[in-house]
Amino acid sequence: MVITRSVHQSAPGPHVLAVAGATGTLGRSVVAAAESAGHEVRCITRSHGIDVTTGVGLAAALEGAHALIDCLKPPQLDDSAGPWFEAAASVLGGHAREAGVGRTVAVSIVGIDHMQDYPFYRAQLRHERAVREHCPDPVIVRATQFHDFVGGRLRRVGDHYEVMAVPSQSVDTRAVAGLLIAQALAVNPPALVEIAGPQEERTLDQARRLLAARGESAEVVGVPASESMTRGGMLPGPEVLRAGLTYDQWLAETYGS
């Protein structure tokens, strides 16, 4: 059962927030939002000399941090990500506890309980369980796919593109980042919340509008996805928080269309 509750009360700040995966798509939005709000951000990435699987650099990055926000993306988006996530959560959680970090907020994906026929979602569910097992005061934020998801799934095949054709409700990463930070700072947050974009879409339609915004006229053909995705597994339930720009608003902002 998903518990979604608005967060109205937060601990007085500013705060020190450690962001794992700070240079990824979501991590960049979290860093920008946190810094804009006046918080100190510790970026946990290999480019900053920090390794979440070996622990190198973690002690210094987590020292004095009030919360850890986990936006990690594994090297491979398949079943092999499961052991990677578990190792990272164990190392991160151990160092966070030693450093006295008060809370861990980790991003996950809406609907993964019901989409276990998709390899990466099996790995992501293992990630959630590992965070709950190893990390201090764990909070999970499940989000639908981001607005740039469709562009990442487009594949050029000869004179046309292909994309999996499924119902979706993509969300702006900035809305997700805001919820992650709110959960990190909340006095008494729920253990699990979900967020989605404001309206239901279809990935095939999104792909066609994306190409139009990019000034491309190539045809887009829908291809089969997993059974659970095809029957609407990526869609949120009625109780989920809906926030952020619509897909068309995001396209206009991103591509000036």
Image: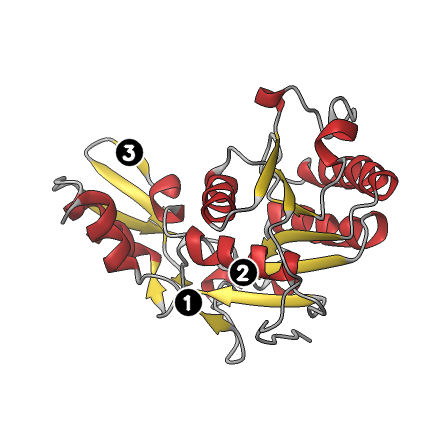
Point out residue 65 in the picture as x, y percentages from the top left corner: 72, 42
Q: Residues within 10 Å of mark 3 (few under 14, many from 20)?
A: few
Residue 109 lies in quadrant? bottom right
Q: Residue 36 bears which disc, if any?
A: none
Q: CA distance from mark 2 to mark 1?
A: 10 Å
Point out residue 148 in the picture as x, y percentages from the top left corner: 37, 46
Q: Nearer the viewer, mark 1 or mark 3?
A: 1
Residue 43 vertical placement versus 142 (above, below) = above
Dot 2 lies on which element?
A: helix
Whether residues under marks 2 and 1 lie with C-beta atoms below 8 angstroms apart, the answer is yes
Q: Nearer the viewer, mark 2 or mark 3?
A: 2
Q: Residue 179 bears which disc, if any?
A: 2
Residue 132 lies in quadrant? bottom right
Describe residue 57's horizontal placement relative to residue 158 as left or right: right
Q: CA distance from mark 1 to mark 3?
A: 34 Å
Q: CA distance from mark 2 to mark 3?
A: 38 Å
Question: What residue do we see at 72% from left, 70% from top?
Answer: 188
Q: Amino acid at mark 1?
A: Ala
Query: 179 or 99, which is in the foreground?
Result: 99
Whether residues under marks 1 and 3 lie with C-beta atoms below 8 angstroms apart, the answer is no
- On the question of residue 10 being in view, the answer is yes
Describe residue 214's horizontal placement relative to residue 2 as left or right: left
Q: Which residue is mark 3?
A: 157
